[in-house]
Amino acid sequence: MYQVADLLDALWRDYTASTPQADRIHALLVARGETVHNDHVALRTYGVPGIDIAALAKPFEDHGWIAREHYRFQEKHLRARYWQHGDPNLPKIFISELIVEEMSPTTQATIERLVAQLPPGFGARPDLPWAGRPWTLTHPEYQQLLAESEYAAWMAAFGFRVNHFTVDVGKLVSFPDLPALNAFLSEHGFVLNDAGGVIKGTAAERLEQSSTRADSIEVAFSDATVKVPSCYYEFARRYRLPSGELFQGFIPASADKIFESTDVNPKPRS
Ligand code: NI
């Protein structure tokens, strides 16, 4: 069995291959003298038995991550949960899944066609979190999914891979707060997701988050190769609870807006 460091390394390499901006931002922070620690790593899947949240969590649980709270995103038809490691220096793992039975019959049929292409035993692969896209689809199928759920379309186009890494802003030494980091990113030409404002959450909620807009990369559909939004980089600053401990959970209303970082046609700031 591979080690924890190999697992995180494989995830980072796979992620930066499709998210060149994450590599550039990471390098800019290191050049400033920072050591970058990750707050969490986020993954997506379809809520289909065998490849659902539980299947995707298995390789992490096998390496010491422990399941924590559940979340529900009504409007986006998602369920999510996060995992925490006994080693506090390791990132949390945030896994979400699309509630397929809440989709239209057309979307359900498209997802069924994708899932029908899975090789036997696929969901049990120890490298499932970076196994890639195990199915083919046409560009019209992608567009049909996109019209109903950006999340369903992203999953169809990219399959099993990290959606985003998240820098732990509290562990950066040369930025006093999240606005200072955001200003640094903007100065270097990175575009931040401003759905719901650039910073989601407040100190009172114990968690502030911002994120870049996803890079677009070429994706091969069976009938065409088209540029579509891939993955983004996220930044999180956590605050202490009255107990003195850092808040480790997530704020559903904020995460809801963060999900929009991979939208093809971003909604205006609200
Ligand atoms: Ni996140």
Image (cartoon, grey):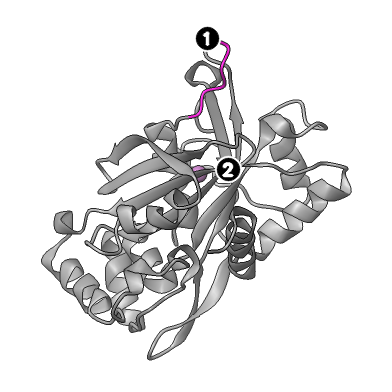
Q: Quadrant of the C terminus?
A: top left
Locate residue 115, reporting x and y percent.
Answer: 25, 74
Q: Which residues are magenta?
A: 243-248
Look at 56% across and 35% down and name the residue there: 209
Q: Which mark is residue 91?
A: 2
Locate residue 5, reporting x and y percent.
Answer: 64, 55
**Which residue is denoted by mark 1 in the rendering?**
243
Which residue is nearer to you in this view: 22 or 61? 61
Q: Chief secondary structure of the magenta span?
A: loop
Q: Indicate whether residue 160 is drawn in magenta.
A: no
Location of residue 37 (image quadrant) = top right
**167 over 180 or under it: above or below:** below
Helix, strand or loop status at disc 2: loop
Q: Which mark is residue 199?
A: none
Is residue 216 rendered to the left or right of residue 29?
left
Helix, strand or loop status at disc 1: loop
Would you call the spot at circle 1 few (<14 residues within 10 Å), some (14-19), or many (20 or more)?
A: few
| Residue 268 visible in the shown view | no
| Residue 63 visible in the shown view | yes
Instruction: Give the residue type that dot 2 points to.
Output: Pro
